[in-house]
Amino acid sequence: SQQGCDPFAQTQRSKLQHRRARINQQINKEMRMRAGAENLFRATSNHKVKETVALELSYVNSNLQLLKEELEELNSSMDVYQNDSESISVPMIPLGLKETKELDLLVPLKDFISEHYGEEGVLFEKEIKEFMELRQAMRTPSRNEAGLELLMEYYNQLYFLDSRFFPPTKTLGVFFHWYDSLTGVPSHQRALAFEKGSVLFNLGALHTQIGARQDRASLPGLNQAIDAFQKAAGAFNYLKENFSNAPSLDMSAASLTMLVRLMVAQVQECVFEKMTLLRAQNDFLARLQLAQEAARVEDVYSLVHQTMRQPHVKDYIPFSWTTMVQVKSEHFKALSHYFAAIALCDCPAPSDAEMLEQEKAFLQFHVTMPEGPSLHVLLQDPEERRKLGKAHLKKAIMKHEEAMRIHGLCKILRKMDILQEVLSFAHKRSLSKYSEIDHEEDFFETGEAPDIHPKTHQKPEIKSPNFSQVKVTDLFHRLGPLSVFSAKNKWYPARRVHLMRGENGFGFTLRGDSPVLIAGVIPGGCAAEAGLKEGDYIISVNGKDCKWSKHAEVVQLLKSTGKEGVDIGVITLQGSECPKAVDRKAAVMSSGMLKSNKENSRKSLMNSKSASTLLVWSKKSKRSKKSTYSGVPFTTVGDNEAMY
């Protein structure tokens, strides 16, 4: 079976996750104390007690504040997640995984199996324990492909758990507890959708950690980082589109929008780094392209910064994140002006053959046209090129200084030497270029350089999770085919019928398989005499379980009976439930809970025999689209009906 990481192996990252777990528990305790104190404060009319409680409340609140600051510092430990390579790469922002409490499903599932399925719950202990071991393992996934597969496998397994044990009209009575990834505040819900959403969030978070640890000084490392951040964006986006009413802030629509944008910006930054690795050193067009790529990175980071400043998000995001994003926005703006200057000052004037192409590129380069001579003249006159280059450098230096100023405001970022080095290196590089092209006899006032038009040659993709890549088998397969034996169907207790074969056979028609259905009963025939009815499913023949049997197998078992006849076990689905009423009850049940809303409209109910998983989250009662008989959903109508 799949294994999580050893939670006791003291890697830097697991120490971090341990501290996170410890802080989460302390926050939990303080919040319980606060709730108790608030209740007492509201309930008492005694002035003295009120004063004491108010004092206690202020103490608890300041404790919570300190704990949250400690957690913020943990969430900002980006360096732990970065790679160990020698080269300097700007740090990326990874997310910590959501923590969850242990969950004991042994009793609730055994009870449900005996009540709903009429089977001995104790016979399914092995399957229940296997499911619980899988859940335990997915709490500590390793930071690689195996860890991602583990989360996917558990997520896919939840589809089966949902279909088997979560009827539309009631809950299983267990609570799923998860802590907010950024604030550590605990939330719990009975809705399985909360469990699914949290696992999906961790899938995204694990992708961010994998992206942040890549060595981006090499092309393969960059491509892996791009892939990881695109998949992280996909997981957060999928979560946002398929869930509503999240109980914790990290899964609210506003937070998820911000996380998707942050991941897209990190992809865009990697694309810029890829360009710097691949570009020809002294080519005019390549440098214009780099400047435009940098402007594009600035663009996406300033969008992230705006998103982080929004009311529901700003008090909740670590200050170091907001600062980092703002620093990057200024830094890349500076770089766009620096590369514009380099293109103008370090590249020779174009030959006649190059002129047309360079003029065309330069025409679309600035947001507004630079003042002064026509482009044709500008590109051919070294002095005009130097003038405009100097204006770009002046703007670059201003932006470098702004980036360094903002960086200095955040004590957590000040501890990050890597970022400090990158900013100061870029600043010095622009300064030395400026002094190199600055002539003492320059009498002209350096103009204002227009901004560079953002443009990228590789648009980031938001890659949705591909759940079918991890095949899982239903752990509770033995309960029978899901088309019939699911939480949403109800059936009357199984009946044992003894059937003799008459001159014209048994007197019924059969259809489909897994389980085989009695499609018609001939009046006055043996089957009718024995009490079999249309719509009955055959679940056993002479004591042999036939829930999963194919049509031909059941026919073979029936045909091989002698004069003594045959014992058939059948069940009848309760078709009397009005689906509308069920829907209404389900809607009442799930309101106010984390809902998985849009999946059902898009996904068909999976064929219970296939191992690949289609996820159907919402609990709406779906009528089978296959041939129906007096309100009973039938399974595959592959075989034609046949008389026996």
Image (cartoon, helix red, strand yellow):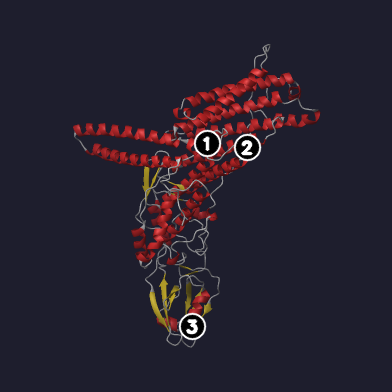
Q: Residues within 10 Å of mark 1 (few under 14, many from 20)?
A: many
| Mark 3 crowd level (few <14, some 14–19, many ≥20, 10 Å Cα) | few
Query: Quick check: 327 left or right of 314?
Result: right
Q: Residue at x 42, y 69 (%)?
A: 573
The residue to which callout 2 is attached is: 274
State the image coordinates of residue 490 (x, y, percent, origin top left). Answer: 40, 66
Tag count? 3
- Residue 253: x percent and y percent? 47, 42
Question: Circle 1 sits on which residue?
Answer: 92
- Circle 1 SS class: loop
Q: Name the residue rendered at 41%, 55% in the picture.
A: 133
In the rendered structure, find residue 560 and report the number of the disc placed on it: 3
What amino acid is labelled 2 in the image? Lys
The type of residue carrying mark 1 is: Met
**Foreground mark, 1 or 3?**
1
Q: Residues within 10 Å of mark 2 (few under 14, many from 20)?
A: many
Sequence-first disc among 2 and 3: 2
Q: Are marks 2 and 1 in contact (CB under 8 Å)?
A: no
Name the amino acid type tagged 3. Answer: Ser
At which x and y percent is residue 322? 48, 32
Residue 514 appears in the rendering: yes
Dot 1 or dot 3: first in sequence order is 1
Q: Are marks 2 and 3 in contact (CB under 8 Å)?
A: no
